Every structure is written in structure tokens, then in C-alpha cells.
Image (cartoon, rainbow, N blue to C red):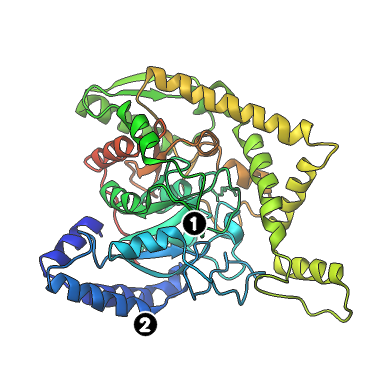
Amino acid sequence: MDALQIAQKFQKKEISPVEFLNQCFENIEKYDSKVQAFLEVEKEQALQEARESEERIAKGQSLSPYDGLPVGIKDNILQKDRKSWCASKILEGFIAPYSATVIEKLRSKGMIPIGRLNMDEFAMGSSTENSAYQKTKNPHDLERVPGGSSGGSAAAVSAGFLPLSLGSDTGGSIRQPAAFCGNVGLKPTYGSVSRYGLTAFSSSLDQIGPFAMTAEGARILYEVIAGEDKRDSTTIPEAVRAKHQAKIKTDLNGLKIGIPEHLLDGISKEVLMSLEKAKEFLSKELNAEVISVKLPHQKYGIPVYYIVANSEASANLARFDGIRYGRRAKISDNDLIHLYEASRTEGFGSEVKRRILIGTFALSSGYYDAYYGQALKVRELIRQDYQNVFEKVDVVLLPTTPSVAFKFGEKVQNPVEMYLSDVLTVSASLAGIPAVSVPGPTDGLPIGLQIQGPHFSENLILRIAQKMHELYQPKVASL
Ligand code: GLN
């Protein structure tokens, strides 16, 4: 399912948006009982929007070349008058009073947001097993996890339900599930996509980004959702973006690719082999120079990430008190504190509670300097490491994950082991740089290779990812 090809077929009137959407719904009805990517599919409004798109195309009044393309939406992105529960019990009953900026942007181009895709509760997790509602399966092997936290978004695209979907990435939640499910997932530069209407997990790390079967598909969706937003003061003004972009290499020929070889200990054999093939291919096809680079502070990535992300989460999730949003516990007395406690105890799952506890501890007055303060300092060193590396090379190439998708239950009892599946993704998040996961060559389960670049190098890293499709073409799973 190549998004661009479908959009072109709409324009040439070879297939209509309504016909296509009905095909999507048919596939979802037939196969999503196996995959369980969707928490909910809203048909009526999507079909209405598809009919409007069809009329526009007939009259030659398309809103964009992508008019009529359906896009699946992760359950933490608000869509006005619809549920948006972050796959949590605590938000049960909550109806979004407004739409996220990214949703408005999709509509302004005639794209059609559909459904609510499953995720780890509040985007905390690496397997989507933390959803309070259902277990999403990896479409390539139903006994394995799709990755997380955007597992539903990744699985829906790889199952062929939709050409495109949106997820969110805080420390790897787009790239890791894209790697496990065998599609392309982009975490954009921090500040390039508005977070207005994205339920916050860790505000200094969260970014919304696209999933697609091809890098070109991811590029289309990224370009639609990116841009400065008055309603999110952390979005970067156009002029600043242009200044950064002017420094990025535009010619793929003679690219300098850095490989942090010191990070490859403990990576599985099949993943290393895939990386090796990609390296050979790119050196040959792009005349690329491959250089070994060092990111010396990357080894602190996991502890720094889990202190920063959980500290911010403990503050962000304080608003879920049973009063303002979603579900309220029934208690027998009139005690307010008791109501908060009961609502949070019933509403949050165990991983979310663990993180609130870790974050609250790291921010507490006696420990603030030792943990949160220290983590911020090391975060800055990680950022500087990348800055130094990008003075020598154009991009960094490394695996997205240490291994292929693991089986259900393999890591749920051991949170630290689960956290380690993000070992190769968190540093780009801490540094705010863009990174894309693209399927690498394999004979077995999907393998993701990651291309990281300087701030606002999305175009460059996606073009390299697109080139990689000549080496290996990802396929929709047969269900
Ligand atoms: N797996 C990581 C975590 O659990 C990343 C999550 C994310 O990017 N939202 O925090």
C-alpha cells in the first residue's frame, strides 16, 4: 500500500476515495479480530468525508494531491467529539472538546482521520502490552508483539488496513514498532510538529510522526503535519527551520555515513547482518563514505531518558484526578483526597503507576539534584555528542532495535529489560534530532535500520530511506 500511488489513483479517478475506504473497512472487519490494532473504527464520519473528497476530485477542486487518503490515529491524539483515552481506564468516558493541530492539518489537505489505534497506556511501553484494553499482535507473527507504544499505528499499516497512520515518539515509540512490524516510521525533529492536542507524556520529548509502507509515504504525511503552531510555543518558526535546512546536504551522492560501532555489542546476529548489507549497498549506490563515529555518552541514554521522561510524566499525569477528565471512582465518603486516591488507583495501570512513582521521587526536594538535575546535564552531553558527530558525517546509521520482535509476555515481568529495548532510540529523542526507521534486508521477521540526522534533516534521511527500498522492499503481512 503505497500512499502516493493511491493518492494518484484518486486523482486519475481510477479508484474513488469512498471505494478505497470501503476496502479498508472490509479488511479491518475481516482481519482486525486477529491483529486488534483498532480500539474503535468510526465509519460514518470517515465515509462522509470520503464522499466530500470524491466530489472535490470530480470537480477538480482537490484540497491537495493527497485528498481522500485515510490516516489512522493513535489514541493519544485528540479528535473533537470523539473518545481519546490513551488506552487507559482513567480516561474512560472522556470525549475530546477540540482537535489536535495535526488533525486539523490533515483535514485541511482533504486527508481523512479514521479510528483510534491501540497503544501502551499513556504511551508508556515498548510492546503495547500496557494497553488497558487489548493486545495488538504483530501482523507478521501473531505470537509476537508489534512493539510500542504506537503498536496499533504500526500494526494497522503493516496489516494493510491503511496506507498511513500517526503515532507519537517520546523515546522510540514510532521507530521501534515500525522496526518490529516492518514499515517506515519517522520521529521528526523536536519542535517541528505541533503537540497541541497530543496528551502529554514527556513534553520535552514527545513528537507526533508518521508510519507508512514507504519512506515517500512517510514524507507526505510528515510534510502535511509539520509547521509552526501558535498554540504550541515549542514549535520552531519557519525562518529558523530554513536556516537549519540550508546547512543540510542535498545531494545523496558522496554522502558521509557514521556508524557508532561501539554501540553494536549485544545486537543480534541477524540485525548486524542486515546493517552490514545496508552499509555495503549505500557505499556502492551512493558512493558513500562510511566512517566509524563515537557517541561517548550514549551509554547513559537509558537512565537519563527514564529519569527525564518519568519526571515530566509525574507532573503531566497529575491532572488525571478523577474530577476533570474521564472516570471517577465511586467512594462511600465525601473526602476529596480519598476520591483522588481511589480514582488514580483504579484508573492507572501498573506501569503508569511505576513511572509516576519514579518521576515523583526523582523530582523530590532531597533527590532533585542527584537525579533530575544530573540527568539534564548528561542530556546536554548526549546532545553535544551528536553535534560533534554531525560536523564529520551527514547522517548516522545504526539498528533501530537490538533484536527482532519478541514474544508476548517475554519482558513484562522485567521492566528494566523492557526499557532496554529502547537502547538505540532514546538518544535521538534526548537530542531532539530526527530519526527514521526503515526496513532492512532480512529473510525472516522484520528488521529496522535507523537513520539519524541533524535537526530538520527529515528530507535527507527520508530520501536515504527511500533509496533503501531498492535494497529491500517491505511487504504488507499476509493474514
Ligand atoms: N518505550 C519507551 C517508554 O516506554 C518509549 C515510549 C515512547 O516513545 N512513547 O518510555
At 68% from the left edge and 57% from the top edge, which residue is drawn?
Answer: 317
Q: Can you say which quadrant of the picture contains the N terminus?
A: bottom left
**Mark 1 against mark 2, which lies toward the viewer?**
2
Which residue type does callout 2 highlight? Glu
> Residue 384 placed where, x, y %?
53, 23
- Relative to residue 338, is residue 36 drawn left or right? left
**Which circle's residue, 1 or 2, is located before the other in the chain?**
2
Name the residue that disc number 2 marks.
Answer: 44
Q: Nearer the viewer, residue 192 or 176?
A: 192
Residue where numbered disc 1 is placed: 150
In the depicted structure, whether residue 136 falls above or below residue 43 = above
* Image height of 475 relative to 277, above or below: below
**Percent of width and height locating residue 139:** 40, 61
In the image, taking residue 81 as reference, residue 381 lies left or right, namely right
- Can you say whether 124 is above or below 91 in the image? above
Within 10 Å of the Cα at label 1, are there few (<14), some (14-19), or many (20+) other Cα atoms? many
Q: Is residue 48 above or below residue 199?
A: below
